[in-house]
């Protein structure tokens, strides 16, 4: 449940509600929305629900008590109707602009990363990706350059001005990855690694959480709930394909997850057609489909010479292919968002323009 405070509630009233929640052994989470302040009551409420509801509604400054019908609370739209907008350096994610995270699957060398970074920045990417610690299905495959790759990523950020995203595979890598990277990526294989989620929730860096390929939308949102409830509200969700009986594509891109996630949650949604399809020829159509379905952006793998790549070669775009996809994606994104603005009530569209 959450407590909606009245517009005239004082700071003392807000404190009073929070103290009451804490005294019950539950945790209050405050959200200052566009219209008013709301406080989520999180924890095992159980049989206390009705009594608690009565007590809270009698406290000074309380307007009403509302249920949150979903098991995910802080990540739900019911609690937080406005979209979460995340700012990292000059990049803004979730504000209606198109986020494009691009770069190699793995950082393989200094020159490979710099060449890719210059090209994707020049073509309009907003965030640079590159794997330093790689979760590989086979222990014999290239495992990433580790800290050396982190240093190259930081150098590429200086060179291009683009913020950097890279994967963190375990909690004991968090400090070093957060030192070099602007956004922490938690990969599909770690989506339900709860100690990693909790630890990432205690950092100040935004986190992109990728959907596990065997996980439901609800499980993804429950995993995001771990990060937000641990204290980090800046979570980006990523649809990257799920396992189905289909074998022609590497995984099956669940395009419907994009609008479902937007309906259920206020968190931004990024689509990754590279890992979903595993085939470079399928990346452009699925990127377009994702943006048409309302994704806040895409993540695509780009390599100067994909045939020589040490990981995921068949799905990486070369530099010219990345430029080509951007030339199609940007005008389509702009057109779709213009149409959406036209459909919104006038007052909202005007407010959004400020
Ligand atoms: C990646 O983006 O580098 C990656 C390994 O993706 P996923 O976790 O979705 O497989
Ligand atoms: Mn990859």
Image (cartoon, grey):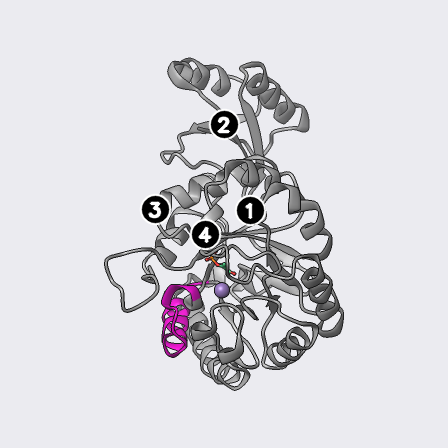
Please tell me which residue is depicted at 50% across the width and 52% down the height of the picture: 187
Q: Which mark is residue 216?
A: 3
- Where's the C terminus, which quadrant? bottom right
Q: Earlier in the sequence, mark 3 or mark 2?
A: 2
* Disc 1 and disc 2 in contact, CB within 8 angstroms: no
Q: Which residues are magenta?
A: 275-295
Look at the numbered disc 4 and give the secondary structure of its residue. Answer: helix
293 sits to left or right of 205:
left
Front-most of 149 and 319? 149
* Disc 1 and disc 3 in contact, CB within 8 angstroms: no
Marks 1 and 3, how far apart at CA: 31 Å
Which dot, 1 or 3, sits closer to the camera? 3
Q: Which residue corresponds to mark 2? A: 42
- Residue 12: x percent and y percent? 67, 23
- Residue 343: x percent and y percent? 39, 66
Which dot, 1 or 4, sits closer to the camera? 4
Q: Earlier in the sequence, mark 1 or mark 3?
A: 1
Q: Which residue corresponds to mark 1? A: 34
Q: Earlier in the sequence, mark 3 or mark 4?
A: 4
Marks 3 and 2, how far apart at CA: 22 Å
Q: Which residue corresponds to mark 4? A: 188
Please tell me which residue is depicted at 36% across the width and 47% down the height of the picture: 217
Image quadrant of residue 10?
A: top right
- Residue 164: x percent and y percent? 65, 63
Marks 1 and 2, how far apart at CA: 22 Å
Which dot, 3 or 2, sits closer to the camera? 3
């Amino acid at each position: 449940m959450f407590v909606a405070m009245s517009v005239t509630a004082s700071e003392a009233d807000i404190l009073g509600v929070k103290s009451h929640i804490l005294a019950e052994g539950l945790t209050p989470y405050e959200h200052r929305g566009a219209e008013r302040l709301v406080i989520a009551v999180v924890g095992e409420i159980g049989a206390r629900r009705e009594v608690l509801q009565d007590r809270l509604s009698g406290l000074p400054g309380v307007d009403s008590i509302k249920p949150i019908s979903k098991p995910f609370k802080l990540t739900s739209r019911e609690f937080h109707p406005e979209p979460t907008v995340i700012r990292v350096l000059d990049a803004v994610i979730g504000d209606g602009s198109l986020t494009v995270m691009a770069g190699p699957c793995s950082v393989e060398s200094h020159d490979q990363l710099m060449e890719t970074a210059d090209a994707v920045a020049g073509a309009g990417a907003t965030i640079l990706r590159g794997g330093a610690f790689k979760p590989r299905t086979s222990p014999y495959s290239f495992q990433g350059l580790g800290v050396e790759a982190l240093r190259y990523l930081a150098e590429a950020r200086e060179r291009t001005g683009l913020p950097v995203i890279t994967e963190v595979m375990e909690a004991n890598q968090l400090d070093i990855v957060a030192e070099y990277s602007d956004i922490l990526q938690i990969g599909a294989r770690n989506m339900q690694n709860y100690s990693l989620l909790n630890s990432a929730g205690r950092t100040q860096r935004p986190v992109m959480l990728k959907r596990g390929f065997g996980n439901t939308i609800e499980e993804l949102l429950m995993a995001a709930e771990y990060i937000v409830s641990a204290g980090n509200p800046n979570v980006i969700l990523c649809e990257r394909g799920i396992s189905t009986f289909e074998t022609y594509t590497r995984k099956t891109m669940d395009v419907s997850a994009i609008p479902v996630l937007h309906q259920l949650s206020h968190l931004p949604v990024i689509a990754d057609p590279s890992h979903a399809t595993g085939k470079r020829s399928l990346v452009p159509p699925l990127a377009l489909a994702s943006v048409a379905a309302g994704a806040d952006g895409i993540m695509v793998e780009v390599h100067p010479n994909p045939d020589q790549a040490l990981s995921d070669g068949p799905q990486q775009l070369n530099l010219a292919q990345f430029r080509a996809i951007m030339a199609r994606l940007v005008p389509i994104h702009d057109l779709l968002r213009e149409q959406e603005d036209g459909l919104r009530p006038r007052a909202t569209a005007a407010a959004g323009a400020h």
